[in-house]
DNA sequence: GTGGTCTAGACCACA
DNA sequence: GTGGTCTAGACCACT
């Protein structure tokens, strides 16, 4: 997982999506132990508070679970349990962006093309 | 155009996309005069400075022109003159967001569907 | 002389340079009578106050002279009487602009080329 | 960098060109951290909002990046990626100014001289 | 500590 | 009347 130090996206959000990505890709499996807050902070050269914040959010989203004195673990990946609120939020932001590029002169086909080629590359 | 006072999206950004949308939909035409800063502020019950900020951003994006002492006008939308740099930036941000929702469990079809229905609504 | 209604340059300044331009090109000769404030305002569809302001500035710069009850006339074109203050101001603004395009990646040669071709075209 | 409090040029614009100049001269290097908004405000005895405004413009021009909670940094100056649109705009404004000084009695040689000596000074 | 947003209110230039 | 600049001061999000 890479943290982009010059991105306008907050570190803690980058951490969150990074961890989710790792789970999605299978790099992190159910029951796997995550690095401790301090370790993770060292790895990415960031403030432990920032890592802590990310873990708290992930816990509130039922993605990980923290056991006092033992550490933090990946929860069973309940795929059916989509966070619709989160999705809705992202959907709106995405449509805003579509609006933006449309205004810049990009047509629907072109956008769909971007997405298609993105998913092809990912395979 | 509606300003959502409880949204986390700043007022001035809401104004910006609202105005762009109005132009895109043809509600605002080239050369049309926008409400004055003070009027717009009154309409949406916000501070003139906030409106001014939105207008300035739109001007820097070549969407409107503002002439001191006279007002603010919609600029000709020079679609042939695509700002590839700007498009590239937005394209990247868009793909980041796609990545994001993908990890939230959304499939490619679903995303393509969102976009399709967005463009259908516009017609 | 053309007044650009959507330029960010104030009308009265456009008028001033327009008149100076006409004098420089010989369209307006020494002792020629300028249109009255009201006429000029009608011609360019602007407020008489705006024309009046331009005339006042030109008068203070010794370019024209107003005779009460008779009208406004072009003064003897005293070429040696360069308005150094005005030139200095423009010189600074020009260098600021050079700084700007330099920052955008334009080299000295290219800029000198622009200017050269500008003067060639004018001949 | 000096801010001229009596100049008609707005503070924030003076700041913008001052910072660009520092970058161009190498005083500020890629990835360097700029003084914080509040520090910069203190240094030049101005309101933090004014500094903030300058930083925002510079960010929209891709000159700096600002990361919430961390500060503002000089971006890599991607010279190969010339923004032709922006250059075109400045070129027109520059030629307008040339026209202006020409009517004030300045000759082509003199203008070319200004530019030449500007670049010589920079070395 | 960092920057971002918003308000309120003053003063100026232009039409 | 229009927009532009600047200040002072409040509150919020992120590190």
Image: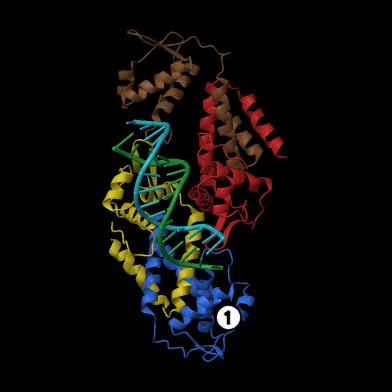
Chain colours: A blue, B yellow, C brown, D red, E cyan, F green
Q: Quadrant of the C terminus of chain D?
A: top right
Relative depth, front residue between B28 and E12: E12
Residue B82 image offset from top left, x and y in percent: 46, 52
Vertical placement of C30 versus B95: above or below? Answer: above
Determine the residue positioned at 58% across, 80% down.
A37
Residue D24 image offset from top left, x and y in percent: 65, 46
Relative depth, front residue between C36 and D25: D25
How many callouts does the rendering have?
A: 1
Which of the 4 quarters of the picture holds residue D74?
A: bottom right
Residue A62 image offset from top left, x and y in percent: 44, 85
Q: Can the viewer see residue D63 in this picture?
A: no
Vertical placement of B67 versus F8: above or below? Answer: above
Chain for disc number 1: A
Q: Is label 1 in a helix, a strand or a loop?
A: helix
Task: Specify few, some or many for label 1: CA neighbours under 10 Å numbering under 14, 14-19, or 20 or more.
Answer: many
Residue B2 image offset from top left, x and y in percent: 28, 58
Disc 1 target residue: A37
């Amino acid at each position: 997982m890479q943290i982009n130090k010059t991105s306008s996206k907050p570190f803690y959000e980058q951490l969150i999506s990074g961890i989710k990505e790792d789970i999605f890709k299978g790099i992190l499996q159910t029951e796997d132990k995550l690095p401790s807050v301090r370790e993770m902070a060292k790895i990415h050269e960031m403030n432990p508070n920032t890592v802590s914040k990310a873990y708290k959010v992930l816990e509130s989203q039922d993605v990980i679970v923290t056991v006092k004195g033992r550490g933090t673990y990946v929860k069973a990946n309940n795929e059916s349990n989509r966070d619709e609120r989160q999705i809705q939020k992202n959907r709106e932001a995405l449509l805003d962006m579509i609006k933006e590029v449309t205004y810049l002169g990009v047509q629907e086909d072109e956008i769909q093309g971007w997405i298609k080629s993105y998913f092809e590359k990912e395979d």
